[in-house]
Structure formats: C-alpha cells, structure tokens
Image (cartoon, rainbow, N blue to C red):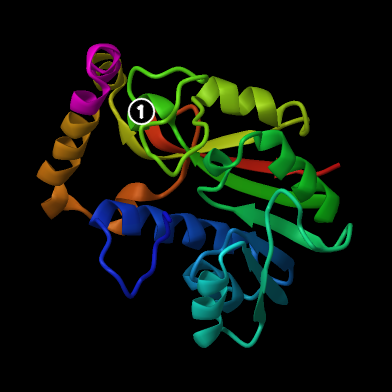
Amino acid sequence: MERLSLDRWASPWLRHQHLARYRWASSFATGRRILDAACGTGYGTKILAEAGATVVMGVDRAIEAVEEAGKDAHPKSLFIVGNVERLPLPDDEFDVYLSFETFEHVEEGETLIEQAKRVLKPGGTFICSTPNRPLISPGHGLSDRPLNPYHTREYDEEEFDSILRRYFSKPRLYGQTFFPAQYKLRLNRIGKKSPALAVRLHQIRKILGIFREHEEKHRPIELPFRGDPEVLIALCTSS
C-alpha cells in the first residue's frame, strides 16, 4: 500500500511534498474541528493539532496505519478506521475536511466529495490534493489505467477543476513542485510512445536535483502560476 511514514525511508521530494502540504494546511487549523481523511500514519494529523485545532480526527481504512498513528498521537487528535467513500461520521460535524493524495485512489472522485460535504458544517473548508496526470503518467488519458499500480484514476488540472465545480461555486486550485510547460509537453510526447521511458526520465530529472531539495521548494502556490505542478490542491468552501 502507498503510504508515507516519517520513520521509514522515502525520496526527499516525496517527503517534502507531504510535509509542505500539511504545513500549508495548518494555517486553516486554529480553533477548528478537522477531519484528516485517509490520514495514514498520522504525522500530518499531529501537525494540524499542534497548529491550534480544537480537535483533529484521523480516519484511515488500514487498521495498521491507525494503530501506528495512535502510538504518537497529540492530545487533541484521535483516530478511527473508516473509508472516505462511506465515512462512519455524522453530518455537519467538521469545520475543515482535509484529504491529501486520496482522490486518485477512489473509482469516482465524486463519492469522496459528497461524503466530505456531508460531514462539513455549512461554510466549512474542503482541502484535497491529487497528482497531476501529465507529469505522473505522461501520455495517458483520463480513461487509461495509471502507471502507479496503487492509483485507480488520475486527473489533469482541467478535469479536476471540472469535478470540483459540480460541488463548489468558486474552487481555488494550488500547485506543488512546478516544471516548465515545455518540459511537460516533451514528456507527454515521449509518454505516448513509451510511458515507462517518460516516467523514468521524469524520475531522473528529480534525482539530478536532489542536492537542491528542500521543503520550501514544494510550498503550495495558487494557480495560475508559471509552469505546471506535479500535484494539484483544491481549496473550496462548502455551501
């Protein structure tokens, strides 16, 4: 299963992306009840709790992840087993619904959003991230099986925005880890002929920049911004 733990090795850019997302989201935490859906091992839940949330509930479908998260839990956090497509939680319960790198793991992203809107209070904040397909699965379309075996469906910026607009009147999109637009186009031309080669070239590019790696490089920036992001982040208000 695809899951980050701060106690185990992960590529520097992956670790920095995850931490930068949670630190950015922590600016919405003070005085609010937060649901961290698909919380994994709970490192992000702890960041949100430390940022001043009144309570942060972490939900994950993997029992072992919930057990690991509970070992170093912040006093203002708690963890339960649950599925983001069928949350075992009451309506209108949270001020913030947050789910990072989960959208691509469900068959229909709409089910995640519908559950999020159900448990959010009116005027609540919806925050969600997903990888940007042209950089993660170059040359692939929406109906193609993602190259990552753990992903069910991947989206590009326009597709992600289109789904969000069915549920939120003014979604705001942010991005992480930007690459030049021409680079994305070249990568996708290669990907149409050899997806595996395109992915390998993209990995090599990141490895070559490893000595310039730092968390600030992956700070979320509101779109549009120059270049194309590797990760898309939605920030929306529930009606």
Which residues fall within the magenta stretch?
A: 187-198
- Looking at the image, residue 188 lies above or below residue 203: above
- Looking at the image, residue 99 lies above or below residue 234: below
Amino acid of disc 1: Ser
Image quarter of residue 88:
bottom right
Image quarter of residue 91:
bottom right
Please state the total of marks drawn on the protein image. 1
Residue at 51% from the left image edge and 86% from the top image edge: 71
- Residue receiving disc 1: 137
Magenta: main secondary structure equals helix
Nearest the eye: 195 or 12: 195
Relative to 199, is 176 on the left or the right? Answer: right
Is residue 72 visible in the rendered structure shown here? no
- Looking at the image, residue 43 lies above or below residue 184: below
Which quadrant: the C terminus?
A: top right
Image quarter of residue 70:
bottom right
Residue at 82% from the left image edge and 63% from the top image edge: 89
